[in-house]
Amino acid sequence: MWSGDGLDLDAYLDRIGWEGGELRADLATLKSVHRAHTGAIAFESLDVLFGRTVGLDVKTVEDKLVGERRGGYCYEQNTLLAAALERIGFEVSGRGARNRTRGDALLAVTHAVLVVTVEGEPWLCDAGFGWQGPREPVPLARPGVEVRQGKWVFRVREEADGVLVLCASREGAWRDLYAFSPQPYHPVDYEVLNHYSSSHRSSAFVGRVIVQYPGDSGRLALVGRQLSRLSPDGRVERREVPEEELLALLGREFGLRLSERDAAELLRMYRAED
């Protein structure tokens, strides 16, 4: 389903800096690959800002995220992760999720996540929720169980009709990140969601800089000209990033180094936000 046979697995593993030894379709490998992926490949939607088509076929995603060492947003990130996991031998299924980080508004299903089954147990895998997302898989068969990933804590709770909600602990309280139903999604479904997210005037990604990274000690988000740093205790520090600092910041904090063409285009559009 995820075209794993078309992926250069060795190049992918080199890109994420994976040093886990022998590849097996077991939980240890799943956790190791997931953590390595989220630690190496930044979340970013700069191609949407540039007005370019965001391709989701495995070759296009591999060329960009692996070959060019760029980042990507949820459809690209989880397409690449799904192809790699499928190639290793995992059973991978897709889901569509509703973002719940923006208050009580009911948002459309626009987020792509994965469910990977290991020894009969389903695990939520998501390399594409940016600075707030999990670094490792989260168990789905045991709703309510708290999962500590370094200094960050997650859990999944269950609502009516089998809807599952990923939550994160912030300042002593649980906050919903997103909710998803049991209905499987396929790559063709992500093509439709990708079209909306990359082109519709109401999309959060259209017309602004978004680059994020889920670090171990702090999580970073550059949205527009504002850089936010989220600490495990819930504190958020914010500051504006001047144009002359932008490219160095992307390399230093997000591991993102752009081509000359992309760097020039980004600076041009960054200036336009003044």
Image: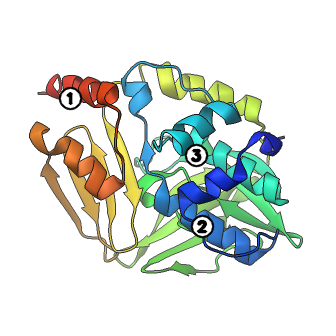
Q: Are marks 2 and 1 in contact (CB under 8 Å)?
A: no
Q: Above or below — where is 102 with respect to 260?
A: below
Say whether disc 2 or disc 1 marks the residue closer to the N-terminus: 2
Q: CA distance from mark 2 to mark 1?
A: 33 Å
Which element carries disc 2, helix, strand or loop? loop
Residue name at image x 24 percent, y 26 percent: 264
Is residue 108 visible from the viewing direction of this image?
Answer: no
Residue name at image x 32 percent, y 69 percent: 218
Disc number for residue 77: 3
Which element carries disc 1, helix, strand or loop? helix
Q: Which residue is mark 1?
A: 267
Disc number for residue 108: none
In the rendered image, which quarter is residue 33 located in?
Answer: bottom right
Which element carries disc 3, helix, strand or loop? helix
Amino acid type, mark 3:
Gln
Foreground: disc 3 or disc 2: 2
Q: Above or below — where is 146 with respect to 8?
A: below
In the rendered image, which quarter is residue 154 located in?
Answer: bottom right
**96 relative to 237 in the view: left or right:** right
Q: Residues within 10 Å of mark 3 (few under 14, many from 20)?
A: many
- Image quadrant for the N terminus? top right
Q: Which residue is mark 2?
A: 18
* Residue 51 spot, x, y in % from top left: 41, 18
Farthest residue, direction right: 120
**117 relative to 42 in the view: left or right:** right
Residue name at image x 75 percent, y 56 percent: 85
Say whether disc 3 or disc 2 marks the residue closer to the N-terminus: 2
